[in-house]
Image (cartoon, grey):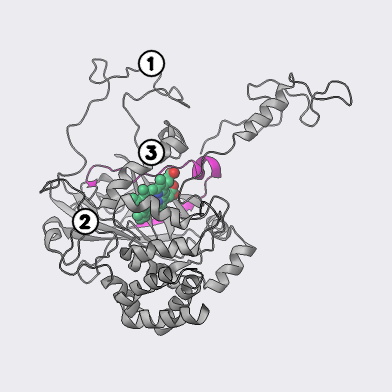
Amino acid sequence: MSTEFDTTAGPLTTETGAPVSSNNQSEAAGPGGPLLVQDQVLLAKLAHFNRERIPERVVHARGAGAYGTFTATADVTAYTRAAFLSAPGKATETFLRFSTVAGNLGSADAVRDPRGFALKFYTEEGNYDLVGNNTPVFFIRDAIKFPDFIHTQKRDPYTGSQEADNVWDFWGLSPESTHQVTWLFGDRGIPASYRHMDGFGSHTYQWVNAAGEQFWVKYHFKTDQGIENLTAEDAAVLAGQDPDSHHRDLREAIERGEYPSWTVQVQIMPAADAATYRFNPFDLTKVWPNADYPRITIGKLELNRNPDNVFAEVEQSAFSPANFVPGIGPSPDKMLQGRLFAYGDAHRYRVGINADQLPVNRPHATTARNGNRDGLGYDGRHAGAKNYEPNSFGGPNETGQPLWAPVQVSGPTGEWETPRHAEDDDFVQAGDLYRLMTAGEQDRLIANLAGFIAKVTRDDIAERAIANFAKADADFGARLTEAVAKLR
Ligand code: HEM
């Protein structure tokens, strides 16, 4: 990132460029006297320091980022007209921010928590953000439950700590979480580093080709470094010894020239299949088994450049699932629909109304052209250009071409439950996942879950939580009941 900071030797100055005589002694009323209001160097320095922080992200506060390159390796023009995917070999600059979810800005990296995988493609048709996780599914299927869910993961309003009671109360009462919780307490729940884990778009998204044909897609990013995880015991030690383990690992690997990469794949469902597919394809608690929709490799993502300034480029980076480009759009997934609002709103609160003008957030392969102006932090980039449309002064014009295709809807509006398809229930895929695990994986899963559930203080909350796993698989439930009983 270019900088306007003058690093050459010369006088220290104020923000407005006047030379500073002392940066070590404040101006006092006599040798032993109190300080003077006229010492504006001191006052401005303290005032700036007080304002160094912006609100941390309400979730995913702790993160590390790097720039890189996405290179398309397949012709997917039959499925999407997105220009950055239009030809094998085409390269697009990217910025990826990894994160943990529940911890605050200063929390340790080596914890059991999903990892964020937020990817910005700086395409010639605008920035495309894919704001995913290292898990293919999520705990809930409707955005309206998200603040309640996160409240149970964060600190209790009375104790000020994360409470096992709250976590398991919510999960027990939200049986749709069983699949994601089984995933999270398995071996992949604590990745060894950000480099050694997969990424997922998680939601179903729409692709639309030049002829207007629609497809539903899911994105997968397969780590080329191989999956590596930490056991609960090793993670507890590492979190204490090196709270920055993931940050350090990513930065140092890139400094060594060991650029981490991911093979990018998609599952593609013809739009007509959606109504009759055995699982609701817009339910974020479900995967599409590979046997139903095989993964197709479409590209390679490599991270090859560290940010120069963590605050400017990582803390102020702003990703939104609502940032689409022509040929890509949302699905009716109720989680995704809520997220289309939440992120832009978070950016306006956290970074300000001109967040998208910052170097890390603005388009790099095209420019933003519209009538939005002014506001806090506006940099005057439009100079005297007209700020309305249409105009007769050569200003930008609307295209008349929506980015994505219309979706058929039917029935009355209402607070509907997510429709269930033939094989949908809250437990089927959690049971499948448990049965796929090796004996060793199952042992560690049971131990990890039991260790946490045993901390719950109320029997009814613990029993309800365990009952969900029993519904996924009877053996899973029986072993967990026994393991928790031993610890309680
Ligand atoms: C309706 C459900 C959800 C809501 C309302 C929500 C809301 C938020 C908000 C407000 C932020 C902070 C954004 C910022 O301050 O810049 C955030 C960050 C994030 N969320 Fe969500 N979220 C939801 C579900 C999800 C899901 C399902 C995923 C992954 C599949 C996800 C992945 C992320 C990631 C990766 C970040 C960090 C982005 C970054 O690195 O800046 N979220 N979320």
Q: Is the residue under label 3 in contact with that under label 1 (CB below 8 Å)?
A: no
Residue segment shown in magenta: 300-329
Compute the Cα span from label 1 to label 3: 28 Å
- Name the residue furthest right: 31
Which residue is depicted at the point 33% across and 68% down? 179
In this rendering, position of residue 29 left or right of residue 9: right
Labels 2 and 3 touching (C-beta < 8 A): no
Which residue is identified by label 1?
384
Q: Quadrant of residue 437?
A: bottom left
Crowd class of label 3 (few under 14; some 14 to 19; many from 20; radius 10 Å): some
Alpha carbon distance from label 2 to label 3:
26 Å
Q: Identify the mark at residue 417; answer none if there is no mark.
A: 2
User: Which is more foreground, mark 2 or mark 3?
Assistant: 2
Of tags 1 and 3, the one toward the viewer is 3
- What percent of the width, then of the height, locates residue 106? 58, 52
Q: Nearer the viewer, residue 362 or 202?
A: 202
Give the vertical position of 184 relative to 373 (above or below): below
Sequence-wise, the earlier of marks 2 and 1 is 1
Sequence-wise first label, 2 or 3:
3
Amino acid marked by disc 2: Glu
Residue 158, position as x, y percentages in the image: 54, 53
Question: Which is nearer the eye, 50 or 488?
Answer: 488
Q: Which residue is mark 3?
A: 345
Q: Is residue 272 left or right of residue 302?
A: left
**Is residue 117 among the parts visible in the rendering?**
no
**Residue 44 sits in which quadrant?**
top right
